[in-house]
Amino acid sequence: MALSRRDLILAAAPALGAAARPTRPPKGFVTVLNGRLALDGKPYRFAGANLWYGAWLGAPAAYGDPDRLRRELDRLKALGVTNLRVLGAGERSPAKAAVSPTFQEKPGEYDPTLLKGLDVLLAEMAARDMKAVIYINNFWDWSGGMPAYLNWVGNGPWFQQGDPDHPWPEYPDYAARFYGDAKANTLFRRYLLSIVGRMNTVTGKAYRADPTIMAWQLANEPRPGGSPASADMAAFQHWIRETSTIIKTLDRRHLVCTGSEGLKGCLESEACVLDAHRPETIDYVTAHVWPNNWGWIDPKNQRATYDAGEARCREYVARHIAIARQLGKPLVIEEFGLIREARAFAPGSATADKDRFYRTIYGLALDDMKAGGPTAGTNFWAWNGEGRAQHPDAWFAAGDKSFVGDPPQEEQGLYGVFDTDASTLAVIKAHAAAVSAL
């Protein structure tokens, strides 16, 4: 059944009623003030991390580990990390390397245990004065995402990312069909209404009233397609405007962002990035920086190609700072990463290049913060903590519970930061202290 305008209005009634009363921004909620992120009238700047699996740890289930969740949050807090980007959705994916279990095993059937895990995560974050960015869809199939919705409604044939029989850009062209598929979006919006309208079973607080949530994010790395020739820019931009408007109608207190990589997520089109972040319902600009994945730094020859690749990363960040300035909106560099030397996965393997890359991104962000620019924070990808690969080949398998920041589509440990990566932890801690001192 399609969601009508009446459905949205009824679901949004509490938020609309509160929004109708002219009040100051509620205490504790992150807002936008004069083109910058703000918290209780003061600039809000942060050092953050990605912890996509936080809800899985919080779940009261065999795969959950609430005690580990508390230890990981304590470790992050001790480093000065105060902002976490987490996954608040997941759909059963036919992909071989995919998250299991998921929030939505079948269309419209939501896992109460995993939702309880998200409740636990938010409650534990609140106890540590941390903020969450929750993304509620995924362009990539490791958590189901857009391809799972397409598969459910019969828009196919489905195939997984990396299938050699479907070389790039067939996968992004397929996933991007989602934006224009009314049936797939009906299923997605049903879940969206459920999660934004949820009541936390641990705190008894409605998500809409919880300042622990900084922002709702439309999706992880949404792209309009795989090439300029095949991309449907109009459908992509319409989906961003429509989905962000629905969220803002349901929840006037929280920020909304796209989850876009920026220029790479827009096929190098600056006009696309501007259009995606221009709507009033999108509160800030996002950017991701992946020099290995984009061919800027060769993982097989990292040391020799690093300098040229870093120069391109610097230019990339500078261009997004300029875009944010042009739009008059804040900027968050919410994903960045580099592999370990020799493409190693294990804790204790060399991280000199990775540490240098972190210092570069942190330095660019801090310089812009000091200059009064739009950059508000960074979220490195990703926190492994005490998680470890469970198999000799380092790939995730169904039933594994030692979650790490590297999702199932990658070897466990490829990009993530372990709790024993002393030199990388020192870089993160030093940056967090510098941001806190501003």
Image (cartoon, helix red, strand yellow):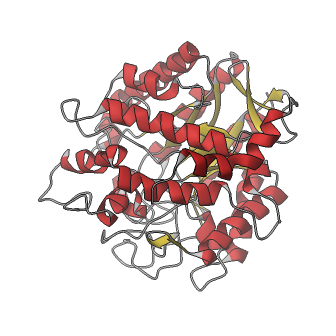
Position of the C terminus by quadrant:
top right
- The structure residue drawn at horizontal position 84% and vertical position 59%, both measured from the top left corner, is 127
Closer to the camera in the image, 393 or 335: 335
Q: Where residue 357 appears, x then y in whole percent?
A: 49, 38
Position of the N terminus by quadrant:
bottom left
- The structure residue drawn at horizontal position 62% and vertical position 67%, both measured from the top left corner, is 55
- The structure residue drawn at horizontal position 52% and vertical position 60%, both measured from the top left corner, is 405
Q: Is residue 327 visible?
A: yes
Closer to the camera in the image, 183 or 130: 183
- The structure residue drawn at horizontal position 48% and vertical position 76%, both measured from the top left corner, is 101
Furthest-bottom residue in this view: 62
Furthest-left residue in this view: 165
> Image quarter for residue 436?
top right
Q: Is residue 1 above or below residue 82?
A: below
Q: Is residue 312 above or below residue 222?
A: above
> Image quarter for residue 361?
top right
Closer to the camera in the image, 329 or 197: 197
Q: Is residue 264 visible?
A: no
| Left or right, residue 417 beside residue 370 | left
How many numbered marks are there?
0
Q: Where residue 202 appears, x then y in whole percent?
A: 79, 70
Closer to the camera in the image, 9 or 31: 9
Q: Where residue 222 appears, x then y in whole percent?
A: 41, 43
Q: Where residue 382 appears, x then y in whole percent?
A: 54, 54
